Amino acid sequence: MKRLRVRLIQVGFALGFWNGIFLSAPSQAASARPELRILTYDSLAAPGGLGPEVVRRFEEKCGCRVRLLGVGDSGLLVARLRMDEERRKTSAHLVWGVDRWLWPKIQKYTEPAGSWQPERWNQIDPDYRGSVGFEGFLPFDGGALSLIIDRKHPGSQGIPGKISLGKLPSEIFRKRLILEDPRTSGPGLALERLSRQVFPDSSAYAEFWRGLRSHWLALFPGWSGAYGAFLKGEAPVVWSYFSSLAYHRAKAPQDASRYEAILFEEGQPLQVEGAFLVKGAFQSSPETLELARRFLNFLLSDEVQKEVPGRNWMLPVIRGTPLPAEFQKLPKPVRFLRLDGVAGVPRGGEFDAWLRAVQL
Amino acid sequence: MLGFGRSNSNLPGHCSGVGAPRTGAFFAAIFALLLWILFFATPVAAVLFRAGNSGPWDPVVGAVAWVTLRQALLSLTFSLALGVPLGLAVAWFLSRDSRTAAWARSSLAAPFGVPTVVAGLVGLQWMGQNGWLAQAGLPGVWAYSLAGVVAVHVLYNAPWIALVTAQGRWAVPVRELEVIRNIGGGAWARFRLAVLPRLSSRLFATALQVYCLCCLSFGLVLVLGGGPPVQTLEVLLDSRLRGSDLNWGSAAWAGTFQFGMTALPALIGSIWEKRRRSATQEVTEEGSGSSGVGALEVSGRRWLGGLVLALTALPLLPWFIFVLGALGNVWRDADFLLGLARAAGTSVTLSLASAGLTLLWVGLAHLGGRSHPRVHWILALIQGLPAGVSSLVLALGAALAFGRWVDPFEGAWVWVVVIQTVVALPWAYRALGPVLEKASLRELEAVRSGGASAVQAYLWVEWPRIRGSVRGVGMAVAALGLGELGAAGFFLGEGQAPLAVWVSRYFSQYRFEEAHAVGACLTVLALGGLLAARGRSS
């Protein structure tokens, strides 16, 4: 028994050291190559996700080393930049996977584009690109958000397929909604921005959220937890991506009609994920700037764009990219709500008004 | 907390002023003090300083502090209401030195090792809208509410309170009970005069510790609270740090409120527990019949004893079912197993490193305490303070204080080890204190006079006496560190995610079966480590 325990401890140490030394540290050969450090969110960087596949293919082309630094949820990307600002050190050359809704916040951390423009910029769908030219934020994938309903859930009875946002805090949705926290989640942020646009008056905005807080079953910190609870049958309705429908159609084609989108009469918010170069990261190495720009171009290549739906369950941004069958019949929103129409960010803490409405 | 080292409390020769060369003890004291200043005082001071410089606090922080206080007091009240009767029943029906009592002690101690990230998943499995309670016809709306948070806190803490109660009841000398009976005292008189004073003394310190733990609970509130308005200061702090709305000032205020709410109770609990142990020791040394301590006879009531034993095992049931439910096809996937091995390796390495650093720190503090009684008193006092601070507050403080030199989020695994160590320190110091302070002076002097060096004398005389407790405490610290999420989630980045972080990562990829399997693995490691630790210490 004693020998077994000793053996177990030895195995633990071996695993840990193997993990710590051989998996985290770059090899001698790798350290000789130029290195591009990319900050991204966890699920994009995780094995099996889109990130490692894109990195592998790019490394084959560039003869460089690319390190993906996964830092948790997408909301944490901005926190990381602010922390680097506090430390007065940059830890990455490029950020990949940040939400376009956060552009007003991330703009100051973005390397000025100057006259440079990604090669396929004009081929990006205008819904994702916006009406202005390239300012530093490169759209990479996107998709509309909506309420997704499980029609086989007993609580789904009587819930209509189309509503006004103002009707969300009504009896029919009481404790049947799973939402995400806008402070920490991209989809949650999109709903909060939508409410800001629909209720520009601050008292109507506060009234909406005050009413909604007694109607949601749970407000999860991240989309993953929210969707996990939805799939476990905790509630019939969840705030998620249109592409969630494609996921279900791909996984269970025989049950395709089970999940539906509930559309808002005001339109659906559009989430656009993108990449940008970090300001101040290239001062001592202009060649790395060239490498980073090559990576941005690579993100818009057909080779990467066609992998987006299957690996990241989002839509590609380049027009005409072939889509898998399950993505081709997604419902059409009344209209997309883009960043252009959002009311200005209030002074002070960004979510203070929201937090006061739901907490006090 | 779990009774480690208590079995050695009757050893003779207690003296804290001899046994180590003065110079060595002095340097050990300096080193222990430096560790405390660097790894605890500086981060906490950084948080307080930032809060002070960021203007008045947001009213939201006050409102969340009130929710935190209410939740912690409700959790404590219900834990006491369930734990005390269960503990009394255990002590009443099971003889202290019997094998069944040993089982009961292990059952009651084990739930404490379950990581909170797993507790959240199990809570949903049972109390969710679609959970087993709802399917059995009971209302399933407990999850995503204050009631859900309180219920899981009770599931965590009531067994611990029952364990402390049972130990308190077992510690009542039979002679005292007989004296009261002989002078005509009934059952109530025996309880009021002999049992209650000892129980209340133990339970007061334990209640303060439970209150602090419920205030510091983070992962569980995140999942089961359902978001605002049920959010605690830890959750607010986390969202201020990890969200796109990074707000150092508000985060620092949340941390300051939290420190204010928990540091004083933790300190009082620490001092109280130390005094209680000293008092207990005096009584024991007077020879008041500790050898006769034991429960009342159980003959003729075996079935009741069995029932009580089953009751003590009941809190383990949800975790057991959770682990069984993870036995799916995923275990045949080689990629998953490789990823699991890496994550387990990281978790085990981090927790073993924090256990090692904790033991080293405790050893230095105790050795340093031998340099002078006043130094001993100061070191004992300050080692208790971290009990009131959360890993998130320490992580925030470390980032504020050492951000220029430490890169948060990437490869700062040393800080994860340090923070887990600081959080475990008060408990480890208290658990090992009674053992380390009782040097076998006569034997040491005899060996030294025979020509052995100080190190040789220590290894021959002291180490065999204390190694069981040292290993037990080390394994318990490692087991409890396995599920730590606050510091690990804050500091660890690419390629270094431990098991607890992997649970949430798999969720984010729609890989629920894998998330469940990793959670089960974490539970088995933590519970196994904790039970092995109990075996070591006993």
Image (cartoon, rainbow, N blue to C red):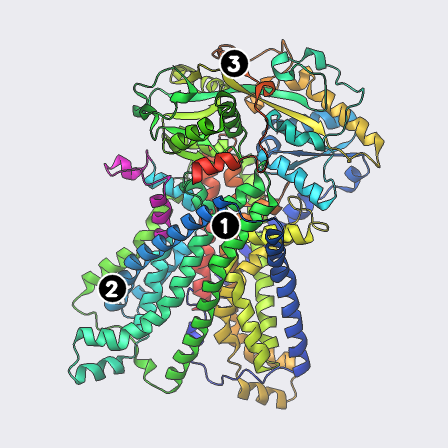
Amino acid type at mark 2: Ala
**Chain under disc 3:** A
What residue is pinned by disc 2? B89
Residues in magenta, as a range? B129-155
Is disc 1 in contact with disc 3, using a CB cutoff of under 8 Å? no
Left or right of A114, for residue A179: left
Label 2 vs label 1: CA separation? 31 Å
> Which disc number belongs to residue B483?
1
Quadrant location of the C terminus of chain A?
top left
In this rendered view, identify the residue nearer to me: B125 or B532. B125
Amino acid type at mark 3: Phe
In this rendered view, identify the residue nearer to me: B266 or B446. B266
What residue is pinned by disc 3? A327
Left or right of B501, for residue B96: left
- Using a 10 Å C-alpha cutoff, classify the residue at mark 3 as few (fewer than 14 neighbours), some (14 to 19) or many (20 or more): many
Q: Residue drawn 35% across and 16% down?
A: A160
Q: Describe the element under mark 2 as helix, strand or loop.
A: helix
Location of residue B343 (image quadrant): top right
**Chain under disc 2:** B
Q: Is residue B368 above or below residue A199?
A: below
Residue A313 in percent (x, y) is at 54, 22
Label 3 vs label 2: CA separation? 62 Å
- Using a 10 Å C-alpha cutoff, classify the residue at mark 1 as few (fewer than 14 neighbours), some (14 to 19) or many (20 or more): many
Q: Is residue B58 above or below residue A169?
A: below
